[in-house]
Amino acid sequence: MRHFPVVMLANVCNAFVFAIASWGTEKFLLALGWATLIWSIVSVMVLRQWMRRAAARGVARRRRGVRRLLLYALALGSAWAALPLLFFGDASLGGKLLITCLSSGMLGGGVFVMASLPVAAIAFSGPIAIGALIALLQVGDRDHVLMAVVLAVYSTILFLGSFNYAKELRTLVATQIAAEEKASASAKNLGALAEMAAGLAHEISQPLAAAAAYIQSAERLLLVPAEKRPVPIAQPLRDAATQLENVHQIIVHLRDSITNRKAERKPLHLHETIQDVIQANRRRQENAGIRIDANLKAADDLVLANPVEMRQIFTNLISNAFDAMESSPERALAISSRATSDNAIRIDFADTGVGISPAIKTKLFEPLMTTKSRGLGVGLSITRSIVEEHEGQIWAEPNPGGGAVFTVVLPVEKAPAS
Ligand code: ADP
C-alpha cells in the first residue's frame, strides 16, 4: 500500500490524458465529465485520508479504514470500467489503443499496489476487467473476442497472484512475529535469571562470610589450652553450622520459587526471628562497634509467614543499616516494635548512618539500585516483594537525629486460644 499515492496520481493523470485525447471529438464533454468523476473521487479520498492522519490509531479505526478503502476502490474501479463501456465502441484505432493501454495500466497497477489486500485489488481492478471485457465482446468480431479471452486469462492470473502474495505475506509476518516474541521471551528470561542470580549471591554471601568467621574463630580457639578458652570450641562451630543451615534454607527456598512451589507459611513469632538475625550478625556488629537497642514491645508478634523470607527481610535491613553506619561517628541501630490499630505489627529499624539522599529516595526499592561499590541493589527490592506478598508494607524515612528509619508493617495472626 506504500505506492497508493502513486496510483492516485496515475488515476488523475490518466483521466487527464483521456480528456485531452478526446478534445475536438463529439464525446469530449462526456470524456470531461467522466474525468471529473475520477478526479472528484480521488480528491475526496485524499482529503479524508489527510484529515484522519492526525487521529489516534486503533483496531476499530483500522477496520473502518479498510472498509473505506474498499468503498473507494470499488467507486474508482467502477468509474474506470465506464471508460471502455462509454468510449471503446465508437473510438478510432488510436482511441481504442489508448483506452486499452489506460484500462490495462489501471487494472495491473491496481492489483500491484493492493496485492497485500486482495479484496481491495479485486474491488478496484475487477470492475475495470469486466468493463473492458464487455466492451471487447460488444464489438463482437473474432479479433476482439480473442482479445477478451486474453484479457480474462491475464486478469485471472493477476488476481490469483494477489491472493498468493497476500498468503505468503501473512505467513512471513506470522513467522517474524513468532520469532520476535521468542527472542523477547528469552531476553526476559535472561533478565529474570540475572536478577535471580544477583539475589542469590546477595542472600548467601552474608551467612557464608559469617560461617567462615566462626570457623576461623574455632581454629583460633584450638590454639588456646582448653582450660583457658573464653568459650567452648563447640560454640563457634554451632554458630557456623547455623549459618550454613541458613544458606541451605535460602537455596531450598529459591528452588521452590523456581518450581513455582508456594513458599510454605507457618505461625511465627517475629520477635524471635529478629533476635535470631541480630544474633547471627553479632560478630559483624561487634567488629564495627555498633550498638543495637532492641525494644520489641508489640504485644502480638505472631504472623503467618515463611521463616526463611522473614529472616531475609530482617537480615537485609540490619545489614544495610550496618553498611550505612560504616563511617558514622555514632553507630547505633534501634529496633523497636509496636502494635498498630489495624491488627498489624510495626517494626522500625532506625540507624544513625548516612541517611537516604533525595536523589535515590524514590528508587530505593527498585531492583539493581545501589550506591555501594560492591552492592548488587537487590536486597530492598526482594524485601519489598516479600513484605507485599505477606500483605504488608515497607517504607523508609529520614531519622530525625540523622540516618534512616526503615519500617515494616505485617498483619498479625490471632494466637490460638490456649
Ligand atoms: P545493596 O545493599 O546491594 O546496595 P539494597 O537494595 O539492599 O542493595 O539497597 C539499595 C540502596 O539503598 C543501597 O545501595 C543504599 O544506597 C540504600 N540504603 C539501603 N538501606 C539504607 C540505610 N539504612 N541507610 C541509607 N541508605 C540505605
Image (spheres, rainbow, N blue to C red):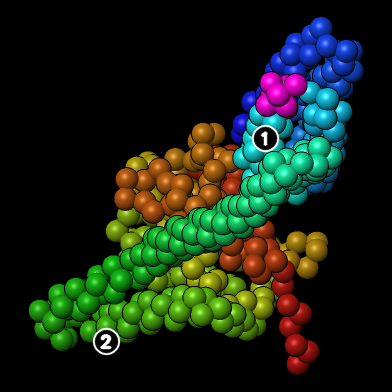
Label 1 environment density (alpha carbons within 10 Å; few <14, some 14–19, many ≥20): some
Q: Is residue 291 above or below residue 399?
A: below
Q: Nearer the viewer, mark 1 or mark 2?
A: 1
Q: Residue 156, how many percent across, how many down?
A: 68, 52
- Residue labelled with disc 2: 234
Q: Quadrant of the N terminus?
A: top right
Instruction: Report if residue 331 is visible in the image.
Output: no
Residue 237 falls in which quadrant of the image? bottom left
Q: Residue 104: which numbered mark, if any?
A: 1
Measuring from the top left, give residue 244's x and y in whole percent: 34, 79
Q: Amino acid at mark 2?
A: Ala
Q: Residue at x 69, y 41 (%)?
A: 143
Q: What is the x, y in percent for residue 339? A: 73, 64
Which residue is most to the top? 24
Instruction: Name the residue type under label 1.
Output: Ser
Q: Residue 265, position in %: x, y?
A: 62, 81
User: What residue span does the magenta drawing correspond to?
Assistant: 92-99
> Which secondary structure, mark 1?
helix
Which residue lies at the image location 69% right of the left edge and 21% below the top edge?
A: 94
